[in-house]
Image (spheres, rainbow, N blue to C red):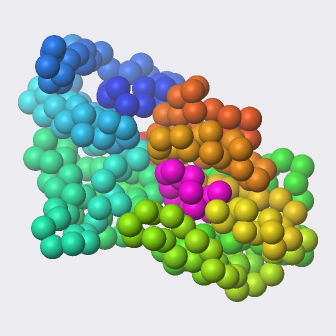
Amino acid sequence: MKIFSGTSNEPLAGRIAKLLDMPLGDVEITRFIDNECRVFVREDVSGQEVFVVQSLSEVADQHLVELCLLGSAIKNLGATKVTAVIPWMGYSKQDKAFRKGEAISSQLVAKFIEAAGFDAVISVELHSENVLPFFRIPVMEISAHELLRETLFSSERNFTSENAVVVSPDKGGVSRSERFAEKAGLSTVYLMKHRDTATGEVTVDGIEGAVDGKAVIIFDDIINTGATAVTTSKFVKEKGATSVYFLATHAVLAGHSAETLSQSVIDKVIVTDTIAVPTTKHFATLDVVSVSSLLADAIMQQTK
């Protein structure tokens, strides 16, 4: 078995390899002056089972092409099975055509990955369940819910059904929030809100349930611009919440989101390292927990 890494999240790939007690495979990834990607696998993979770690994070297009070139090169060298380990499946938000004339981007990404020669995929919390049917190869989807819950509850905070509640940030996250709340032994409160389709601005219109005097835990799969997190947190604080903890699996942290979150009323933001978070986007209330053990376990399951 061998493990290779693309350039999108080398720190995570290194942690996975360390847990599996093996070095990362020797590969040279360079770009021509016109920014075309060039991949050169330096070692023999013939007859081996190979895993390639690459998140489809910013810049998603480049990292997707890099992943496909790696898969193709390794497959052409005679690897018996090649699995794409994609901690963050970029384009998973584009799982349907919202307007006539739009491409279903996540469907095309699945085809690209298959065409590159990958035999299977391991990913962490796909944004939409619609993505799975787009693949004709096996996909193992891992949940980070328990990891985030343990991280939050491992501190001295004593969350009970009397002093804490899980708040669902939007309709799309209701089932996700309910599953998280059930595992944590807490109840769920539901927000009513809408998003301006022209500006993207989120407005909270109301709440079903009480947060007064309670710690609020908001769980989502992605934290992108931070607009939802900030708006929701401000609303529940105004409704009497004593503290707010925002948990998200994928820290996209687009644009000025890190600065926005650092200046918000959120007491703690906990994310995973499915996307590499550069030091420039770290802030005092941010904690990053690694999914390396989850992915190392998934890789071992695949090899059995």
- Considering depth in this image, is 189 or 198 the residue closer to the camera? 198
Residue 47: quarter of image: top left
Q: In this view, does 255 lie to the left or right of 44?
A: right
Above-or-below relation of 259 to 246:
above
Task: Tell me, yes or no, whether the highlighted magenta stretch contains residue 73.
Answer: no
Residue 144 x %, y % = 56, 54
x then y, percent, for residue 234: 73, 62
The relative height of residue 169 versus residue 15 in the rendered view (above or below) is: below
Question: Considering depth in this image, is 183 or 207 the residue closer to the camera?
Answer: 207
- Is 79 situated left or right of 168 in this image? left
From this view, report whether residue 288 is shown above or below residue 249.
above
Horizontally, residue 224 falls left or right of residue 153, namely left
From the viewer's perspective, is 25 left or right of 87? left
Residue 81, image quadrant? top left
227 falls in the magenta region: yes
Residue for point 89% across, 49% down:
156
Q: In which quarter of the image is the N terminus?
A: top left
Please indicate, yes or no, whether residue 67 appears anywhere in the rendered image: no
Name which residue lies at 52% across and 59% down. Answer: 221
| Region rendered in magenta | 219-230
* Residue 186 image point, x, y percent: 76, 74
Q: Between 105 and 20, which is closer to the camera in this rendering?
A: 105
Can residue 232 be seen in the rendering of this structure? yes
Q: Which residue lies furthest to the bottom in this view?
A: 208
Image label count: 0
